[in-house]
Amino acid sequence: MAPMVRFRGLRYNGCVERDRAVDWARGVAALAMIEGHATHGWASAAAKQTVAYDWTRVVATSPLPAFMLLAGMALRLRVGAAEVRGERPEAVRASIARRGLMVVLWGYAASALYAAIDGHQGLKTFLRADVLHVIGLSIGVLPLLCIPRALPVDAAAVTRRALGLSLAVMLLAPLYYALVPAPGGALRYLLAPLVRVPEVTLFPLLPMLAWTTVGFVVCDVIERARKRFSRDAVYAGAGLAALAVAFVCEGITRAMLGADGVLDDVHPAGIPNMIGYAARGLVLIGVGPLIVARLPELGRDAMTRLGRASLIAYVFHIPFCYGLPARPLRGNLQMHETIPYVLLLWAVSYGVVWAIELARAPRRAPTRSA
């Protein structure tokens, strides 16, 4: 049996033992993601003018930064384990880059699947830069930029580099978007995942990479706090602090924009806006473990499973919110009418995750009776 070792409040047994709180946060973010897409796709024009719909938008804007923060947190745990095991830096860089590449490929596969269901508009449908692309690229790019080849893996040093990278990406965003012209022709499809290209990019790596790098730093802070305080205290504190930051950044953004300002990639108000959205994601991460920890064991296991397979839940639920399967509901429901359908979509999405996990589980060979 491999020896048990302590590393900054987390237990390892030859490999990283996953922090269930991170999986729980990811599971809650998946539920919020499904709810946000479903109400956006199904609510009627009149329903979208209500206060209830406005509140769903507060929830709907939190999952993406939460997922990117959680990707950074998972990377921090991976790098910490690599330091403990004495892994070679090039091996760590390569393994994380492969993981990021797989998520990007999932993004292109999802685009192809949606095109097969709903039709397409040529290359801009198949090569658009969507949620999975930006998450996968951020996973792959961060270790390449923050883990030196020639030095042993040092989690603290990598965290400092991640913090510097996040500040640079956010602070320089108005500058590099103002200086770089929008690409045209075939070049726009190559650059679409990296920078915002009209009609092709939904979510660009720059400046959204900052959310993943901030997640790397957040995980380091949480690990240190877990040495002194309980899990509930740490996550509650993170959520409350993030809520305060979100409110402050919202006020700063509105003040910088003024009455007639337009928020775009070159406006300096984009900087507090980026920080504010990161804070919204952290609120979700703080609240998630507090809720799930109080569920019965069956509920905790379900949220753990959903959190670990949130990518599958994402790919599955989108057509039921916006695609051909959603046609009877799309744009036709009042807000109260969306509730049972959201609950049903939660249940079906979890059922798909559970079925795939069951199919992947190794089957035990039948025992022969004497």
Image (spheres, rainbow, N blue to C red):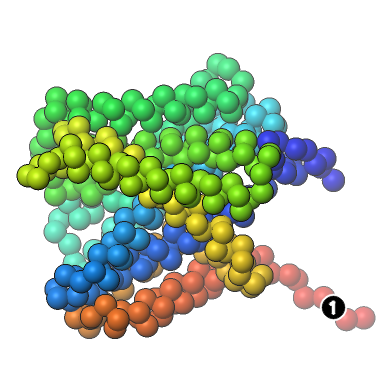
Where residue 197 appears, as percent x and y from the top left, is 16, 41
Q: How crowded is mark 1: few (under 14 residues within 10 Å), some or many (20 or more)?
A: few
Where residue 10 appears, as percent x and y from the top left, is 69, 42
Residue positioned 41% across, 80% down in the render = 344
Residue positioned 28% across, 51% down in the render = 130
For residue 134, say whether it is visible.
Answer: no
- Horizontally, residue 164 falls left or right of residue 225, namely left
How many labels sit on residues? 1
Residue positioned 53% across, 47% down in the render = 237
For residue 239, say whether it is visible.
Answer: yes
User: Which residue position is annotated with label 1?
Assistant: 368
Q: Quadrant of residue 225?
A: top right
Pick whichever, 87 or 34, lies toward us.
34
Q: Residue furthest top?
A: 150
Check the picture and name the quadrant holding the C terminus. bottom right
Residue positioned 28% across, 37% down in the render = 272
Pick whichever, 301 or 153, lies toward us.
301
Where residue 285 appears, as percent x and y from the top left, is 48, 52
State the SS at label 1.
Answer: loop
- Horizontally, residue 238 falls left or right of residue 19, namely left
Q: Quadrant of residue 181?
A: top left
Pick whichever, 140 or 347, lies toward us.
347
Q: In this view, does 17 lie above or below 80?
A: below
Q: Which residue lies furthest to the right in this view?
A: 370
- Horizontally, residue 174 falls left or right of residue 221, namely left
**Three-letter residue code for mark 1:** Arg
Q: Is residue 155 above or below residue 369?
A: above
Where residue 254 appears, as percent x and y from the top left, is 19, 43
